Image: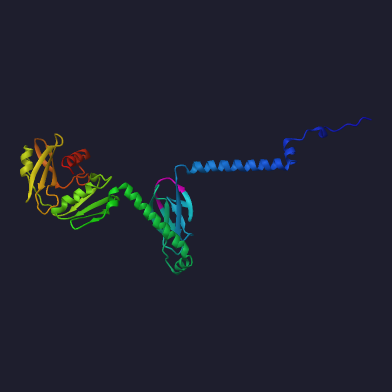
């Protein structure tokens, strides 16, 4: 009798059956899958972090709950954020809740804060976890330095201030908008020197700042108007020791008058003060009292091109 074999005995082993019988092949497959997963993960991470800033978050205590624009973030960790403005809320039981508006930039890549205890339990935690607060204090210092760098890049003049000497002082304070207000304190004899100093500051556009002079205005300005601008400029503005120096049409509508003070005590005896007149109908009227320099802050209604032209003509 002829023996026969079942059909199953004639089946060729599948590729998976062969691989299962080959440990080396299985290891190769597993390694390939792991490499593929790592590659995919790396690509996803790169895409997610593209054009974002690596931000170090350090808030003491580390157990504090942190939200940034309403979204929870991890404390004592590095996160990735787009450049821009954020609102931080940090809260923890037995500590005072803190809120702050922060800006993330290439310079500013720290979120740091130290919560203040509100009871004995919070103080005890702070004493027992002093290193957390030391780390947060260090990170807060870095954040403040970065904030200063951002401010100096936006307003270059502040990196030169304050300036103090026997003749004048130049300092600044932040306004409600954040822009610096430049304060010059001196007497009229040395005001020209202070303005000249401002003009030497590298990368500083003087008309871009709100400059305020802490001195008595020596001029008496007439409210009269006249169709004769040269006569108005010479007689409509008067002051002791000051005299009309020159005038120039900035445009058909604007006329610049320059006044000088001859003072033997001044370090620069040709100190110049600028006044601006504008034509209204057939008459001219003064729109800017005599002052050492024009800026867009003290003349907000005047076009910046007119301001720059006036300063340039007067050598300011």
Q: Is residue 34 magenta?
A: no
Residue 288 visible in image: no
User: Does residue 128 appear to the left or right of 278 in the view shown?
Assistant: right
Residue 14 visible in image: yes
Q: Is residue 122 above or below residue 54?
A: below
Q: Magenta segment, which residues? A: 80-87
User: Does residue 184 appear to the left or right of 128 in the view shown?
Assistant: left
Q: Indicate the colouring scheme.
A: rainbow
Task: Please identify the quarter of the rendering in which residue 89 is found.
Answer: bottom left
Can you say which quadrant of the picture contains the C terminus? Answer: top left
Where is residue 185? Give x, y as percent. 19, 55
User: Does residue 35 appear to the left or right of 25 in the view shown?
Assistant: left
Q: Is residue 84 magenta?
A: yes
Q: Residue at x 49, y 54 (%)?
A: 77
Q: Is residue 2 above or below residue 74?
A: above
Q: Main secondary structure of the magenta part?
A: strand
Q: Is residue 161 above or below residue 116?
A: above
Can you say which quadrant of the picture contains the N terminus? Answer: top right
Where is residue 276? Give x, y as percent. 14, 42
Farthest residue to the right: give it.
1
């Amino acid at each position: 009798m002829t023996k026969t074999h079942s059909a199953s005995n004639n089946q060729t082993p599948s590729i998976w059956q062969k691989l299962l019988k080959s440990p080396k092949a299985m290891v190769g497959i597993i390694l390939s899958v792991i490499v593929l997963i790592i590659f995919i993960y790396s690509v996803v991470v790169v895409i997610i972090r593209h054009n974002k800033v690596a931000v170090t978050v350090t808030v003491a205590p580390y157990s504090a709950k942190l939200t940034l624009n309403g979204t929870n973030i991890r404390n004592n960790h590095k996160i990735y954020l787009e450049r821009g403005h954020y609102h931080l809320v940090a809260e923890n039981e037995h500590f005072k809740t803190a809120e702050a508006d922060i800006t993330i930039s290439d310079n500013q890549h720290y979120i740091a804060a130290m919560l203040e205890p509100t009871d004995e339990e919070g103080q005890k935690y702070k004493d027992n976890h002093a290193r957390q607060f030391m780390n947060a204090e260090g990170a807060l210092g870095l954040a403040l330095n970065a904030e200063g760098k951002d401010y100096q890049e936006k307003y270059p003049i502040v990196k030169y201030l304050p300036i103090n000497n026997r003749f004048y002082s130049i300092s600044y304070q932040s306004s409600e908008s954040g822009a610096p207000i430049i304060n010059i304190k001196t007497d009229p004899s040395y005001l020209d020197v202070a303005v000249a100093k401002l003009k030497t500051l590298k990368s500083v556009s003087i008309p871009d700042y709100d400059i305020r002079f802490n001195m008595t205005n020596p001029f008496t300005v007439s409210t009269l108007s006249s169709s004769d601008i040269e006569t108005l400029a010479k007689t409509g503005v008067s002051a002791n020791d000051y005299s009309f120096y020159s005038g120039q049409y900035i445009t058909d509508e604007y006329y610049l008058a320059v006044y000088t003070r001859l003072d033997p005590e001044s370090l620069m005896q040709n100190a110049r003060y600028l006044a601006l007149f504008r034509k209204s109908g057939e008459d001219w009227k003064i729109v800017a009292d005599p002052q050492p320099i024009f800026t867009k802050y003290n003349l907000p209604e005047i076009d910046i091109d007119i301001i720059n032209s006036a300063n340039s003509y007067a050598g300011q």
